[in-house]
């Protein structure tokens, strides 16, 4: 999943950069940071799927709906309702948006390095319980036979 995310990130950043020509001040840093963010979200999705199964996919959709609205990428967070203001500092996309603004426009690198820590921590926090959760789901029990019977 991480390799596919890196490939997609590189392609999605390369095509507009070469075809349309917007100048990114730190193009390589932008692609690298987006690969880190892609790995972060892949790890979160994999953990939610391994831990909660079908319900985890619903949680992924909820997370995908909450993050763009609370990240401040589309409009300022200060103009959002209170829920999104409360979620803003605790979700990884909020930090990714701030770092991308600095990388693309040539701002300082301090916010970028600080923002790199957030996806790295989320990735580690999601990967740690993924293997045990996936192993538990592979064990067949009387409560959960495999393949699951269908009517």
Image: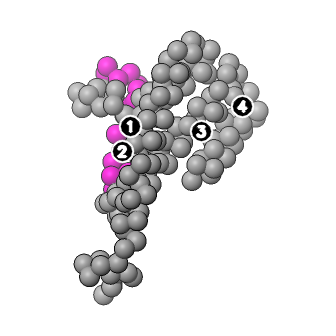
Left or right: 100 with respect to 53?
right
Q: Which mark is residue 63?
A: 2
Residue furthest right in the image: 18
Marks 3 and 4, how far apart at CA: 16 Å
Name the residue: 53% across, 21% down: 112
Which residues lie in the magenta part? 57-79
Marks 2 and 3, how far apart at CA: 19 Å
**Which sits earlier in the primary sequence, circle 3 or circle 4?**
4
Residue 46 falls in image quadrant: bottom left
Marks 4 and 2, how far apart at CA: 29 Å
Q: Determine if the magenta segment contains residue 65.
A: yes
Q: Are marks 4 and 2 in contact (CB under 8 Å)?
A: no
Query: From this viewpoint, is residue 20 visible?
Result: no
**Which sits earlier in the primary sequence, circle 4 or circle 1?**
4
Q: Are marks 1 and 3 in contact (CB under 8 Å)?
A: no
Query: From this viewpoint, is residue 36 visible?
Result: yes
Q: Are marks 1 and 2 in contact (CB under 8 Å)?
A: yes
Name the secondary structure under disc 1.
helix
Name the residue: 35% across, 66% down: 136
Which quarter of the rendered picture does the C terminus lie within? bottom left
Comparing marks 4 and 2, which lies closer to the viewer? 2
Residue that label 4 marks: 17
Secondary structure character of the magenta stretch overall: helix
**Which sits earlier in the primary sequence, circle 4 or circle 2?**
4
102, 142: nearer the viewer:
142
Residue that label 1 marks: 67
Q: Position of residue 149 (x, y in %)?
A: 33, 85
Q: Is residue 8 above or below residue 68?
A: below
Marks 1 and 2, how far apart at CA: 6 Å
Comparing marks 4 and 1, which lies closer to the viewer? 1
Q: Which mark is residue 35?
A: 3
Comparing marks 2 and 3, which lies closer to the viewer? 3
């Amino acid at each position: 999943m991480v390799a596919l995310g890196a490939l997609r990130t590189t392609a999605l950043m390369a095509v507009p950069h070469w075809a349309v020509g917007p100048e990114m001040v730190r193009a390589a840093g932008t692609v690298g940071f987006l690969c880190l963010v892609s790995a972060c979200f892949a790890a979160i999705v994999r953990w939610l799927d391994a831990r909660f199964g079908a319900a985890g996919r619903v949680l992924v959709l909820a997370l995908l709906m909450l993050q763009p609205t609370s990240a401040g990428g589309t409009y300022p967070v200060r103009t959002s309702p209170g829920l999104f203001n409360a979620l803003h500092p605790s979700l990884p996309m909020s930090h990714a948006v701030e770092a991308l603004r600095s990388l693309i426009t040539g701002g300082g690198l301090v916010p970028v390095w600080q923002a790199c820590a957030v996806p790295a921590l989320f990735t580690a926090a999601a990967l740690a319980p993924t293997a045990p959760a996936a192993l538990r789901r592979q064990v067949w029990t009387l409560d959960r036979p495999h393949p699951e019977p269908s009517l």
